[in-house]
Amino acid sequence: MSVFTKIINGEIPSYKVAENEDFIAFLDINPNAKGHTLVVPKKEENKIFDLSKKAYQNLMDFSYDVAKALEKAVPCKRVGMSVIGLEVPHVHVHLIPLNEMADIQFAQKVKLTNDEFVALAEKIGSNFE
Ligand code: AMP
């Protein structure tokens, strides 16, 4: 069982931003930039291109709505999108508020307090439509 399935099952906590029947979005715990959000299908699958076309399109649709909320909540030049999955083999889309190229590189991390994570998740979530 992946760490994300444990989050989906409520076994471990997350800073949840949005959710529907099939997807959940929560803050990355080790963010590249403030507001770095992960969008995850609730059904555990390893690789994104093992999804059916329909499931892939639904993931992109949900990611679009989360990105729109992120743009409203977190000032940035643009929201970047990345799919990796080398650390957690459960499909997820990284949505990252970008101001410079370094923000999309997974070498630079920002430290946030619990209160900052809570406030960010609340702010992004309140912009989710
Ligand atoms: P990757 O699988 O390489 O796309 O990276 C997995 C991402 O998940 C990394 O950016 C981690 O910081 C993030 N991550 C790992 N565990 C958690 C967790 N419990 N809550 C939130 N984000 C996590």
Image: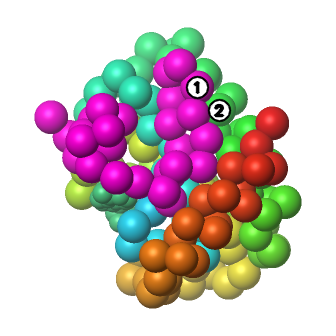
Q: Name the residue at 53% across, 19% down.
A: 21
Tags 1 and 2 touching, CB below 8 Å: yes
Which callout, 1 or 2, points to the residue nearer the camera? 1
Is disc 2 surrounded by few (<14), some (14 to 19) or many (20+) residues within 10 Å?
Answer: many
What x and y, as percent, mark residue 111? 45, 86
Residue 76 falls in image quadrant: bottom right
Would residue 96 be visible to someone looking at this image? no
The residue range painted magenta reads 1-27
Q: Which of pointers 1 and 2 lies earlier in the amino acid sequence?
A: 1
Is disc 1 surrounded by few (<14), some (14 to 19) or many (20+) residues within 10 Å?
Answer: few
The N terminus lies in which quarter of the figure? top left
Q: Amino acid at mark 2?
A: Phe
What x and y, as percent, mark residue 104? 55, 72
In the figure, is residue 61 to the left or right of 118?
right
Magenta-colored stretch includes residue 7: yes
Q: Name the residue at 76% across, 43% down.
A: 128
In the figure, is residue 22 to the left or right of 47?
right
Q: What residue did someone put label 2 on?
A: 62
Tally the marks. Answer: 2
Q: Name the residue at 79% across, 63% down.
A: 73
Asked if residue 121 is positioned above or below residue 92 in the image, the reply reads below
What x and y, as percent, mark residue 11? 24, 42
Element on which disc 2 rests? helix
What x and y, as percent, mark residue 10? 32, 38
Residue 99 falls in image quadrant: bottom right
Magenta-colored stretch includes residue 17: yes
Q: Amino acid at mark 1?
A: Asn
Q: Which mark is residue 20?
A: 1
Q: Quadrant of ligand 1?
A: bottom left
